Amino acid sequence: MSLNFSDEQKVILMNQYSILEDLSLLKGDKKSADEYANARDGIRFGYGDWALTNVSAGMDNEVSEDDKEFVLSVLDMYSFIYGSYDKFDEAQKKEISLNDIMFVGFDGNEDTYGFYRFVTRQLGRYSEVVKFINKHGWDDNSHGFESSLPVMLRNYKKINSSDLITADNNQLFEFVKSILGK
């Protein structure tokens, strides 16, 4: 389902979610207030149906479904890479270094970065990826240097998902190498 709001509908929804947020704060319900604030922000920045995942609004253009799918696929890929890397032995970690798997990120001037931040920071999804990035002090803003992501993603999508589930440590290592083009 894809939600498309007119500017008038966005303003009305933003106002409604702001009122609900304020009422929740008056009742001392911070969790609900945060959900309403997230929904308001999600609508405002054009995140469509993701805006209402937890139960907000603005005037930006809708982020394209292709961009949303790209971000989610990249996050799935990094979730796999980081989960696998944590299982590598020391010899494997010498062959594939932290530098090799550093989070490339998204350009902070593009919609993909805003959607990435919304999904990971506001909705709390892909927390294992965020923790890995933070643990190593990496920046999630690529500053325009994310050109390797489409190639990595194509390599990742060539791997059969059922193979990922049943893979042993050596197979995981080979899968990560193939994603990285090594």
Image: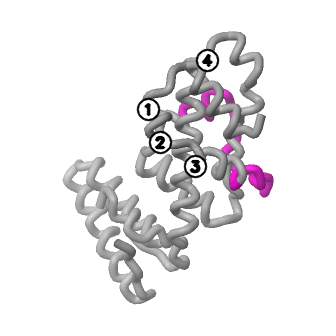
Tag 1: residue type?
Ile
Q: CA distance from mark 3 to mark 4?
A: 21 Å
Mark 4 and mark 3 in contact (Cβ < 8 Å)? no
Q: Earlier in the sequence, mark 3 or mark 4?
A: 4
171, above or below 35, in the image: above
Between 131 and 165, the one nearer to me in the picture = 165
Q: Position of residue 69 (x, y in %)?
A: 52, 61
Q: CA distance from mark 1 to mark 4?
A: 16 Å
Q: Which residue is mark 2?
A: 161
Q: Secondary structure at mark 2?
A: helix
Tag 2: residue type?
Ser
Q: CA distance from mark 3 to mark 2?
A: 8 Å
Residue 168 magenta-highlighted: no
Residue 165's label in the rendered image is 1
Residue 157's label in the rendered image is 3
- Residue 45 seen: no
Closer to viewer: mark 4 or mark 2: 2
Task: Give the left or right position of residue 132, taking residue 161 as reference.
Answer: right
Q: Which residues are magenta?
A: 131-150
Q: Secondary structure at mark 4?
A: loop
Residue 88's label in the rendered image is 4
- Quarter that holds the C terminus: top right
Mark 4 and mark 1 in contact (Cβ < 8 Å)? no
Q: Earlier in the sequence, mark 4 or mark 2?
A: 4
Q: Position of residue 17 (x, y in %)?
A: 32, 69
